[in-house]
Amino acid sequence: MNLPVTVKVDVYSFGVVLLEIICCRRSVDQRLSENEAILQEWVYNCYAAGELNKLVGYEDVDTTTLDRMIKIGIWCIQDEPSMRPSMKNVLLMLDGTLDIPAPPCPDSFRSSI
């Protein structure tokens, strides 16, 4: 994208890495179906559909923690940098100190690659 580099770029990168760790896969995997190839898009679709268990391969995980981590990741990858939280707020959200509102849908990821 043709946007200036700011501290919000680090927040975006953190969000991508967080989602990669949670889902145990790369951000883009062209071996997967079109619906799952772009991790960020697939994560949001699963979140919106209430199907977070798909993201962890139906493993037995604490659903409250998973929901919190996914919401943090989605907030961090917002297309508009001003929508992304500060890293301080990300830390407070990770710690459970700061409430996490439902994240909006990020813009299409396909249009940015």
Image (tube, rainbow, N blue to C red):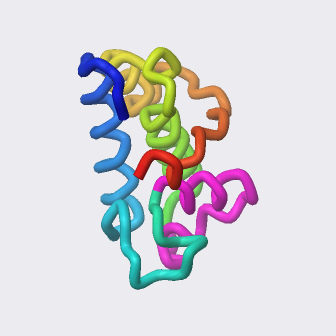
Q: Does the magenta run of residues contain 15?
A: no
The answer to whether 39 is drawn above or below residue 71 in the figure is below
**Direction from residue 74 to residue 29 in the image, left or right:** left
Front residue of this view, candidates 110 and 37: 110
Quarter of the figure that contains the N terminus: top left
Residue at (46% x, 29% y) in the render: 96
Front residue of this view, candidates 48 and 56: 48
The percent coordinates of residue 105 (x first, y second) are 65, 40
Residue at (49% x, 65% y) in the render: 61
The percent coordinates of residue 42 (x first, y second) are 56, 62
**Direction from residue 65 to residue 11 in the image, left or right:** left
The answer to whether 69 is drawn above or below residue 34 in the figure is above
Residue reaching furthest to the right: 49
All told, the count of numbered labels is: 0
The percent coordinates of residue 98 (x first, y second) are 50, 20
Q: Main secondary structure of the magenta part?
A: helix
The percent coordinates of residue 26 (x first, y second) are 31, 66
- The span picked out in magenta is 40-60
Residue at (35% x, 60% y) in the render: 27
Residue at (65% x, 58% y) in the render: 45
Front residue of this view, candidates 88 and 97: 88
Front residue of this view, candidates 62 and 86: 86
User: Residue 73's quadrant in the figure?
Assistant: top left
The answer to whether 61 is drawn above or below residue 94 in the figure is below
